[in-house]
Image (tube, rainbow, N blue to C red):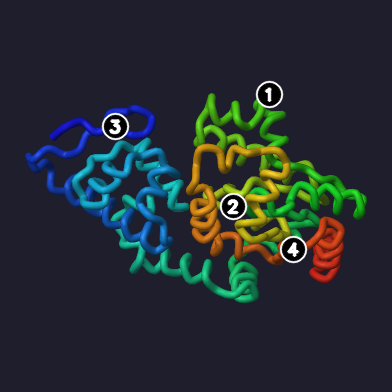
């Protein structure tokens, strides 16, 4: 069988025709089935998953067929692109029948008030105590998190912090250089550290986080437990238009399918963003109108009471 390389030029080793250890074969088949089913449930075409993970479409096809002996590093990229932890793909328990995983899926799809009741029953301390007066704005880039967070902080007389700026201060370099030097895993590690440092030093604040924070379950769980979260949302067209209006043409540069990819990312993360305690739709709204909406939402939910 000929060699296969991914988008980064790394040589991948598909299985030969000789059958190895039965347990290993079963694991490879199990991983492939789960990757395929997760991709199909999210409505992500294989070519889009390839772009998101950096693994070639041909190798993804072999992986899903149970014929590709994927490395841990590449599998981690696929798991991140699917918004799942890697153990979800390799564990022996069937993620669609396991009670614990079923409970997690039910929780994610339950209405907000039901999720809050469950958290109140299971939380080791009262939610209000854990969250203090911290507010976090989540959602995709271009929704208005930074602009509205900064203005709301000024209006309310409380600190406004961007998590990526904290990461840059900690790393001593811009986020794009952090990604280039340390990769996604290193960035996520710095992100978790910055989050814990913010929680330890601020009882009252507004925080804006990057859209992909929901793909790291432990960090997202920490965010939900220690902040009153607000999903700042907009249509994909407005997300893209606002980013370009800021002078950033990278999302569309040389990528005619960028809008389709943005829609897939938004769709795949909707159930995660929907775990926020409140939602702010900025579609078709001016900055002033959206700011008034945000301040009213904070007041009506008693996030600073």
Q: Earlier in the sequence, mark 1 or mark 2?
A: 1
The residue carrying pointer 1 sits among few (fewer than 14), some (14 to 19) or many (20 or more) residues within 10 Å by Cα, namely few
Label 4 – label 2 distance at C-alpha:
28 Å
Secondary structure of the residue carrying numbered label 3: strand
Q: Is residue 206 left or right of residue 2?
A: right
Disc 1 and disc 3 in contact, CB within 8 angstroms: no
Secondary structure of the residue carrying numbered label 4: loop
The residue that disc 2 covers is 220
Give percent across and percent down for residue 49.
Answer: 40, 48
The residue that disc 1 covers is 172
The residue carrying pointer 2 sits among few (fewer than 14), some (14 to 19) or many (20 or more) residues within 10 Å by Cα, namely some
| Badge nearest the viewer, 3 or 4 | 4
| Badge nearest the viewer, 1 or 2 | 1
Q: Earlier in the sequence, mark 1 or mark 4?
A: 1
Residue 149 against residue 252 in the figure, above or below? below
Query: Quadrant of the rendered structure where residue 128 is?
Result: bottom right
The residue that disc 4 covers is 284
Disc 1 and disc 4 in contact, CB within 8 angstroms: no
Label 1 – label 4 distance at C-alpha:
37 Å
Secondary structure of the residue carrying numbered label 1: loop
Label 1 – label 2 distance at C-alpha:
24 Å
The residue that disc 3 covers is 5
Q: Earlier in the sequence, mark 4 or mark 2?
A: 2
Looking at the image, which is closer to me, 132 or 164? Answer: 164
Looking at the image, which is closer to me, 21 or 184? Answer: 184
Residue furthest left in the image? 18
| Badge nearest the viewer, 1 or 4 | 4
Q: Earlier in the sequence, mark 3 or mark 4?
A: 3
Label 3 – label 4 distance at C-alpha:
44 Å
Give percent across and percent down for residue 282.
Answer: 74, 61
């Amino acid at each position: 069988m000929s060699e296969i390389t991914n988008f980064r030029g790394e040589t991948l080793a598909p299985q030969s025709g000789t059958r190895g250890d039965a347990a290993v074969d079963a694991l490879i088949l199990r991983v492939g089935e789960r990757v395929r089913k997760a991709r199909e449930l999210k409505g992500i075409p294989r070519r889009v998953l390839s772009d998101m993970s950096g693994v070639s479409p041909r190798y993804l096809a072999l992986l899903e067929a149970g014929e590709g002996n994927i490395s841990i590093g590449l599998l981690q990229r696929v798991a991140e692109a699917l918004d799942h932890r890697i153990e979800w793909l390799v564990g022996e328990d069937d993620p669609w029948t396991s009670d614990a995983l079923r409970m997690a899926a039910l929780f994610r799809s339950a209405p907000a008030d039901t999720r809050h009741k469950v958290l109140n029953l299971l939380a080791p301390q009262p939610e209000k105590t854990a969250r203090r007066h911290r507010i976090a704005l989540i959602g995709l880039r271009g929704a208005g998190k930074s602009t509205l967070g900064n203005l709301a902080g000024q209006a309310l007389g409380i600190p406004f912090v961007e998590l990526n700026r904290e990461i840059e201060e900690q790393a001593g370099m811009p986020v794009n250089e952090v990604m280039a030097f340390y990769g996604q895993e290193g960035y996520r590690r710095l992100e978790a550290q910055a989050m814990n440092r913010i929680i330890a030093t601020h009882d009252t604040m507004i925080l804006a986080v990057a859209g992909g924070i929901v793909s790291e379950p432990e960090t997202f769980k920490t965010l939900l437990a220690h902040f009153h979260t607000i999903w700042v949302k907009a249509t994909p067209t407005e997300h893209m238009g606002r980013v370009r209006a800021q002078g950033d043409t990278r999302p569309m540069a040389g990528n005619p399918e960028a809008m389709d990819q943005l829609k897939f990312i938004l769709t795949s993360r909707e159930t995660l963003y929907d775990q926020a305690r409140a939602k702010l739709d900025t579609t078709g709204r001016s900055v002033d109108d959206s700011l008034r909406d945000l301040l009213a939402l904070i007041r009506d939910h008693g996030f600073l009471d």
